[in-house]
Image: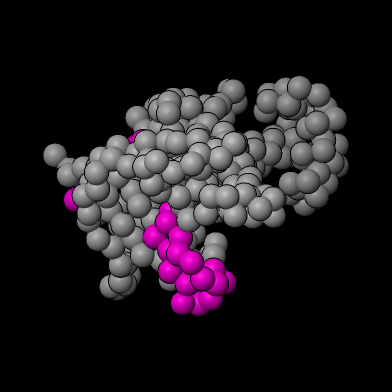
Amino acid sequence: MDWVKSLNKAINYMESHLLEKLTSEEIAAHIAISSYHFQRCFSLLTGMTIGEYIRNRRLSLAGQELSISKEKVIDIALKFGYETPESFTKAFMRFHGVTPSQAKAEGAGLKSFHRLIIKITLEGGSVMDYKIVSKDAFDVLGMTRAFKAEKSFDDLPKFWGEYFLSGYHKRVTGLMGVCQQERLASADFQYTIGCEYKQGAEIPNGFGLITIPASTWVVFKCVGPMPQAIQAVWKRIYSEWQPQAEYERIEEYDFELYTEGDNQSKDYVSEIWIPVKKNT
């Protein structure tokens, strides 16, 4: 898949439907990828969520209209998807620093947020450590919860923090973080903290098994303190490796593998495992 072309196609779709109700599922369906991977890729490459991008674009355009038109504030609010003048005013002030009424005054200071154009520029060589491996199906023993992709960057670290603060790691070592997306049309996903299961071992209360199917995996090595090191490699996967790879990812499972030791050390090693198939 040409990720740059697909992301720009998604942005074009958002721009064409800014005045309509938009969901990440609808946008992802337009470019034929899962909502989960679309949201993760978009956030990693742009530094913002899809919701933030749409909201900023709408508020930017709303500011322009207020400054040049005679339309009422309530009409502008409804036009750009706000149900009440109060909610519009609150969002408008947070973005522009002035109220909608003040924006109508001559000389009012407003902020502009331009549409995105995704470009991947390769500047010289840089090394990414990875390997291609085949692995039979295996089970993971862990604690699983459901998450929204849009909020996952905040909610997943909280889950990890709770896992260790509550002492769950003493019952099941937290050496893996597994993402499982069960429905391609959904932005929801299941996330499991745990470890590879040894057949016959006890399954503690509150924990369960998930089966990871046999697959070919591309494995990326990450070196450095968590979570910065692994987040940096995820961004490079989307921006450097995937646009020119001979493999296409399988949108089913992926997982992060952690090692024992100080995860804040500059030498700490972790891995990202992504299931793939050869491009046809």
Q: Quadrant of the N terminus?
A: top left
Check the image and report above or below for 109 versus 85: below
Near-viewer residue (139 or 49): 139
Residue 101 pos. (x, y %) = 85, 37
Specify the quadrant that holds the C terminus.
Answer: top left
Please determine whether, in this image, residue 226 is positioned above or below residue 6: below
Give the residue drawn at x 31%, y 67%. Answer: 128
Q: Position of residue 94 (x, y in %)?
A: 78, 46
Apparent side of residue 27 relative to residue 102 in the rendered image (left or right) = left
Q: Which residue reaches farthest bottom?
A: 266
Residue 239 seen by the camera = no
Q: Is residue 258 magenta?
A: yes
Write the start and end of the magenta stretch as one range. 246-271
Note whether residue 130 is visible. yes
Q: Position of residue 277 (x, y in %)?
A: 21, 42
The quadrant holding residue 8 is top left
